[in-house]
Amino acid sequence: TQLLEQSPQFLSIQEGENLTVYCNSSSVFSSLQWYRQEPGEGPVLLVTVVTGGEVKKLKRLTFQFGDARKDSSLHITAAQPGDTGLYLCGPGYALNFGKGTSLLVTP
Amino acid sequence: NAGVMQNPRHLVRRRGQEARLRCSPMKGHSHVYWYRQLPEEGLKFMVYLQKENIIDESGMPKERFSAEFPKEGPSILRIQQVVRGDSAAYFCASSPSAGSYNEQFFGPGTRLTVL
């Protein structure tokens, strides 16, 4: 089972701030997905990154896949309360997603 | 196009009873995955199934837990003789194939409470 470490585990910021969360592993992945999970709901797929060095943007969210395809980052610009949730990264099944990064954005 | 459906959304059982959790994958998806989530442990893989086949059950406890994905009907995760430690949120995900992208689409989950 591949292991992914996400950091920070908890993040509490005010609306309008920028933030970056990280997803790291010692394994190489053919692809990596990012999900957001809101309380009481299932994870929702945000993006898939495939190519080393790839950058994908989803409105105010910027995802980057490391050159060696072992790590990824998610940068949120001008965070809003609607961004609150648990952010999980994972390369597919048979993975313990781990605890993810729990983000709280306050008005 | 309906997403992944799970029912029930909430399930309460007493110790020793059986729990049956159902998952209907997205239309056209033939791969189903079950996960368990506890606040202190994160989202943990349990089992991966295709129609009528268990592909990987490495995350499933050896006793009391079983899963199936019949040719017709939903996937079922069954927990026999439940104990308090089984209380958790159980998520099902589906994907169209086992290709390299492995994009999974999750259902809303079933929250199991064992009294």
Image: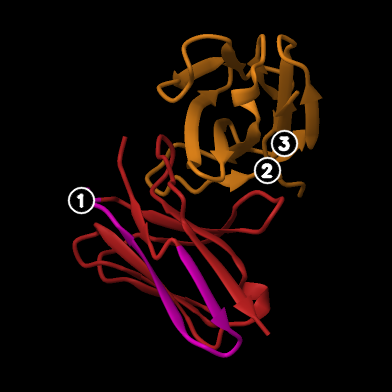
Task: Residue A78: give x, y in percent of width and height.
Answer: 55, 88
Q: Which residue is located at x 47 percent, y 34 percent?
A: B45
- Which element type, helix, strand or loop, lies under badge 3? strand
Q: Which residue is located at x 43 percent, y 47 percent?
A: A98
Mark 3 sits on what residue? B111
Task: Residue B96: give x, y in percent of width and height.
Answer: 55, 40
Q: Residue flagged by tag 2: what amino acid is it? A: Gly
The quarter of the picture where residue B87 lies is top right
Which chain is orange in the rendering? B
Residue A26's disc is: 1
Please say if A54 is above or below B3. Answer: below
Check the rendered structure and report the hue given to chain A: red
Please say if A92 is above or below A75. Answer: above
Magenta segment: does it hold A22?
A: yes
Q: Which residue is located at x 59 percent, y 39 percent?
A: B93
How far apart marks 3 and 2 lie (CA) works out to 12 Å
The quarter of the picture where residue A19 lies is bottom left
Q: Which residues are magenta?
A: A10-28
Q: Residue flagged by tag 3: what amino acid is it? A: Arg
Task: Residue A103: give x, y in percent of width and height.
Answer: 54, 68
